[in-house]
Every structure is written in C-alpha cells, then in structure tokens.
Amino acid sequence: MLSVSALFLCFCPAAAPQAPAGGLEQLVSTLEQQTLERRSAAETAWKTQGKIYLTQPSRGTMSTLLDFAPYIQEPVLDSLESNLRTTGSNPAQIGDLLQLLGRCMNRGGAARLLPLLPELPKEHRATALRYAIEQGGVRTRRSAHTYLSSQQADVRQSALETLLLHQDERLVPGLLANVDPGHVDLESFGAILELVAQRELPEGVLLPKSFYEQKGLDFINGLVSFMGRYPQPDTEDYLVERALLPRNEGLSIEARKSALGAYESGSAAFRWRAGTRQMTRFLKDENPGEATYAVAWTLHRLGEKSGRKHLLAGPEERAKANPDDWRTQMVLGRMQVDVGEFNSAYKTIKNTFEEIDGTPAGRRLSPDDYLYAARAAAGARRPKESGRWLTATRYSPIELAPYRDLPEFQQYLKKAPFNHLFPVAD
C-alpha cells in the first residue's frame, strides 16, 4: 500500500518542486499525523459504539459511526473477517456489517471486501458484490467480472446489473451483447435497462436479438426505453407492434408511448417506413382516445399529414358545432399553433379576440391565450401583433425564456419588443 507521502506526490506532482524541501516534508508529516489520528479515532469509535450498532442496528446507531468514514471501514472489515473465520459465525451480524460498509467504504475497502465473497454466507454475497463494484476502482470492477458466470443466480444478476451501471461506459456494450435473457431476472433487468439508457454509451451499441422475444411487460418497458435513447436496427416492426397492441394485451399507455418514442428516435435508420403506414391505418380503424392521440403526434413529428389531420379533426368539429363558444375556438387555435398551421391559427385567434373584445369573456383571457396568439402571429409573419400580444401576457423575461427558441420567433429576436422580452442566450 502506498504511504501518505507517496500518495501526496502522486496527486500533486506539480506542487512538489515548487515548495521548499522543508515545507514539503512538514506538509507530508502533518498529513501522515492527521491520518494516524483519524484511524485511531475510528478504531476507538468502533470499540465503543460498534457494539451498540451490532446490538441494535438502525440509522441512528449507524450515523455516529459514519462520522468516521472512510477510516471506520478498517475495523469493520477486521470484524467481518473475524466473524467469517470464527466457528459458528453470525450471518445476521455479517449482514449488519455489510450494510455499514456499503455506506462508508472507499476503493481500498472495496478491494479488500471482494476477495471475501466466497467466504460469505450465500444470502449476503450478492449484496456484498454490489457494494464492492459500486465503491470499487478499475481493478476491483475488472475482478468482479468473474462473478458474471457464477453458479449462484442472484450473484450473477448482481454482477451484471451493477457492472452495467458502474463499469466504464466503453465496456457496457460488451456486457449487454453477452446477456442471456434465460439466465437473468427479466423483471429486475428491465428497470436496469432504463437506468443504463441514461449513461453516455458508445455510438452503435447493440442489444441481443433474443431480447425481442421476451414477453414480460416490465422487461419490455425497460427495453423500449433503452431503444428510445439508443435506436436499434431492424426493430421497426417490433416497436410498431408494441405501440399498436390492443388494450387487452396488457401494455400500459406509458409503455405504448415509450415504444412510439423509440420508433421516432430510430425512424431515420428504418429502411421501409412501413410503420408509418400501419400507424395511419390505426388512426382510421381505432376509436379516438389517448392511444390514437399519441400515435397522431408521432406521425405529425415524423412529417406525416395523417397525424396533423387527426389532431385537428376533433377541435375543428367542436369549433364548427359551437361557433359562439370562444373557449372552443381558442382550443382550435392552440392546436393549429401546435401543429404549425400558423396562418389558420392567426385567423382563428384574431377573430375570437375581436368577438369577445370589451365583454366579460375578454377579461378572462389567460396569459397563455396571449402567448398562443403571439406564436400564431409570429408564425404568420405579423410581428407587430405578435409583439403586442406577447407583451400582453405580462410574463417576465425569465418566464418567457423557455419559448425563446421556438422557430416562429427566431427571425424577430433582434427586433423590439422581442429583444427586450426574450433573454439573450448564453
């Protein structure tokens, strides 16, 4: 093990030559003395308070020991080794020691814990392995790879899941490529896939084809979430089928939306775009609802007219049936803005504003109504009215900041009042 002085020189290589020899030696000596004092304090704390924790493990009895982290790990590991090598070891106490180590360990402690795994009771190995990988350094994590082929299922699962979350991101694709769905708990692994998708993985990471044969809903949810961040080739049919399954197949609306999002993310790589045709047929055949609404938005974002037509159909029908209901007209105007029909939106909203001007209804217009009016006017290339309506929102520049980058405002950002209302981008 490196001495404190050696560690200091490793982490501060540029500092050493600049300090006088006596000053550097004094600093190293001070650091060594402080380390010895903290180790001694940790050992004393374990002797006086460790017994209390082991007698009555709780957050309160643990917190007093955590004040001495990471040095407290050394006497705790000593106690763990002693327990394991004593005839009639105490499994419950081993679990309590591991829980404490999981909160106070650093890389050195993790490197010391990992070789103890074969000696631990079976029920504690998976937990200990997870702690060692989470807190360990490169060598410890590399050594933990041997447990990917463990005969003990929960240890194997712990190694795979924890390495996927904490291993160097460049090594994650190799781990994923070798996953056998028949050897893992798919319900748990689906949740892990969602978390792994949040990591910055190398471009082109591929999942095993066997993943798409699995039926568990929790696994499918995790799978499509992963595919939304990292699109997979040749999965168009799989995603469309998941998105368009009937309700009695058990998929939640959230899962269907995830599948649609994954399809949208990977659409550029799909060769045939047959999925968009299937979704268009779905809109025609299925009764309107949350599922068709989600499909329509996906089609609209992909540039398919059928999506925009479906989104506008309901608001247009209700506006036509209720010409004197200003709120119904505003719902139509807002949807026209949302789908980029700015000229139509401008006419709808302007006419509505004129009809209720000077009436009690006119005083009930919300700031968002004015914001949509400003967006419609900007998109219809009527900057004066857009600026007037944007000012009428009475939103502050901070409140308007999220709308600054909307495409309809871009050509006016340097003109008044837009240049005063929208903050300057960093």
Image (tube, rainbow, N blue to C red):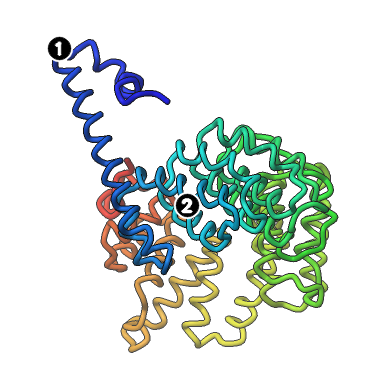
- Res 197 visible: no
Residue 283 drawn at (x, y percent): 77, 69
- As drawn, 64 above or below 155: below
- As drawn, 417 above or below 74: below
**Mark 2: amino acid:** Gly
Residue 230 drawn at (x, y percent): 66, 44
**Residue under the image location 76 percent in, 78 percent down:** 287
Secondary element type, mark 1: loop
Image check: 343 left or right of 416? right
**Residue under the image location 82 percent in, 65 percent down:** 281
How many neighbours does mark 1 have within 10 angstroms: few (below 14), some (14-19), or many (20 or more)?
few
Circle 2 residue: 102
**Mark 1: amino acid:** Pro
| Mark closest to the chain's N terminus, 2 or 1 | 1
Q: CA distance from mark 2 to mark 1?
A: 41 Å
How many neighbours does mark 2 have within 10 angstroms: few (below 14), some (14-19), or many (20 or more)?
many
- As drawn, 196 above or below 169: below
Circle 1 residue: 20
Q: Quadrant of residue 88?
A: bottom right
Question: Looking at this view, is 229 or 300 the one in front?
Answer: 229
